[in-house]
Amino acid sequence: MDKFKDIPPFSKLGEILVKSGMITEDQLNKSLAEQKFSSDRIGEQLVRLGFAVEEQVCSGLAHQMSLEFIDDERLLSAPEDAVKLIPEDFARQNTLIAHAKENGSLLVAMTDPDDIIAIDNLRKLCEFQITPALATASGINAAIDQLYVRIRKDTEAKDIIDDLQIFAESEEEEEGMVDMTKTDAGVDDAPVVKLVNMIIAEALKERATDIHIEYQDANVSVRYRIDGVLEEVMKPPHSSHPGIISRIKIISRLNIAEKRLPQDGRFGIKAADREVDVRVSILPTVNGEKVVMRLLDKSSFSRSLMQLGFEQDMLKIFKRSIIQPYGMIVVSGPTGSGKSTTLYASLSDIKSGEDNITTVEDPVEYHSDGINQVQVKPKIGLTFSAALRSILRQDPDKLLIGEIRDGETADIAIKFALTGHIVFTTLHANDAPSTITRFIDIGVPPFLVGSSVLLVMAQRLVRKICPNCKMEYEPDEYEMSALHMNDDEKERYKDIKYYRGKGCVHCRGTGYYDRSGIFELLEMKGPIRRLVFDNANQEEIRDKAIELGMISLRESALRKIAAGITTVREVLRVTVQEYE
């Protein structure tokens, strides 16, 4: 490491840590004084007094012993083919883990590289030359917890279908429901059924929103989308692929013989404490069919507006808009950005026995008491527009339209908003100003848009830093320059502290757990309405909105960084740079 380059190895640990700038001379002297009254080593004493962290002491020891130091983050990236060379029990007992193998040598991260007995046993066990490296005990234990779990999943999947003939079942599940309370399939069950059940059960346990199954050169890749990011969790062998696809087609009521065309289906799964609706999409690729399953929890909605991540000033604007007697509230953003969650939180906030609240959705994502929910079924003619025409005769007060997809639906929604109803809806657009122009693009006259819309809100979801492994750090030059803050932002955020997650078992080594919303609220004030009436472009609308105080998505994300909620890299991942 660069900080040790001018420090001779085999120096005293305290001297190494002082010269590298990790601790001060005064802190070392205090630790040495305290050490006289305890049996702790100097490194343990420094950590106990809070003068250094475990990783700093361990890196100093590695330099002292002329060994490689492997930090906690690198430990979690160890390849499985190296890790599984050492049995899990042996790794836990001796607090060590394999990190890499090359040319007959195995690099092993240890807390005690002088443990000759453990190294000798490893040499006999793995039949490799052992190269010891130094790592923290907490880092090694976290890596063992995470990596061996992944290896067990892959092994279990392989064992299920190894040496067995995969076949497509002829019996269909009753009403398309799969009972996930029976995840421990019996010995008589088809192996492919157990494998598919295991994939779904693990997805539910890991809070996944989507499951991706695709054929690759070396194996089948199973990935879960957790907190908005895909993570590979399992790699069953090639032979499992036809059986997995056939099983999913059967329970989704799809044609198992059709492999040339895309197919869409659905089924329900029963877990121990909830029911989940699964939307299935099968796409033929050059390597074979790919499956994506979206998991929609049908349990009762329980989130409030306060839990979504609104800043106080934004929450005040949003609440002021949703209590209006008529008009339209539009939430925009890509698929998976939390639009439906925000709208349901809005309805929960304003719901009362005095109102007739109706929703039209495809699909109904949450079940909510006191709200009349309509599921669109295009195959029988129950489209958005057909449902909305019927709802007009149902004496509605408040209406939620799951998504505006065409000019006809938009026209009916705007007529609702102009005739004494409050309408909540979503639209796919990149930001708040472009949502206005999107309405016009699908055929709604500008004067109707300007007259009916009360508020447009664009939103995204950013991952939150894992509270269990949150640590302060200094962003590198790339991160800071990529934020491209203007002079005003640089002044406002010059003294903030930056945080990130180191990676732990709780967050599966990602450093993130759960998500929070970032928002861009465009109120339809007089000057904005006049621009819309004049058919202004989105840049003119954006400039005027910012002049009137609109907070952009990027600015909202910067606030999350300043509050220690998310990271610079996460903000760069989900927001677009705003150029002058």
Image (spheres, rainbow, N blue to C red):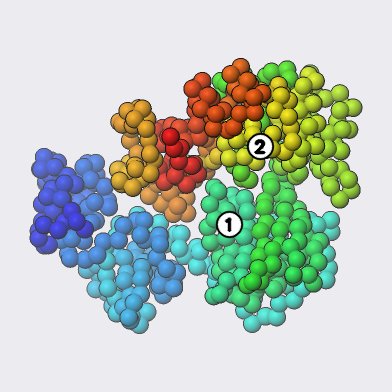
Secondary structure beneath label 1: strand
Position of 380 relative to 256 (above/below): above
Question: Where does the image place residue 360, in percent across and percent down from the top left?
Answer: 78, 37
- Within 10 Å of disc 2 (Cα), the crowding (few <14, some 14-19, many 20+) is some
Please tell me in which quadrant of the rendered image residue 143 appears: bottom left
Looking at the image, is mark 2 or mark 1 earlier in the sequence? Answer: 1
| Quadrant of image for the C terminus | top left
Please tell me in which quadrant of the rendered image residue 433 appears: top right
Circle number at residue 536: none
Residue drawn at (77%, 57%), measured in percent from left and top?
A: 265
Question: Where does the image place residue 560, in percent across and percent down from the top left?
Answer: 44, 34
| Residue ID for mark 1 | 224
Question: Where does the image place residue 276, in percent across and percent down from the top left?
Answer: 71, 49
Closer to us: 247 or 313: 313
| Residue ID for mark 2 | 438
Residue drawn at (67%, 56%), measured in percent from left and top?
A: 293
**Three-letter amino acid code at the position of disc 2:** Arg
Position of 7 relative to 395 (above/below): below
Left or right of 178 on screen, residue 549: left
Left or right of 509 on screen, residue 62: left
Position of 49 relative to 347 (above/below): below
Closer to us: 71 or 87: 71
Closer to us: 78 or 432: 432
Residue drawn at (38%, 44%), measured in percent from left and top?
A: 482
Position of 559 relative to 23 (above/below): above
Secondary structure beneath label 2: helix
Q: Is residue 432 visible?
A: no
Left or right of 324 on screen, residue 376: right
Mark 2 vs mark 1, CA separation in Å: 32 Å
Please tell me in which quadrant of the rendered image residue 174 appears: bottom right
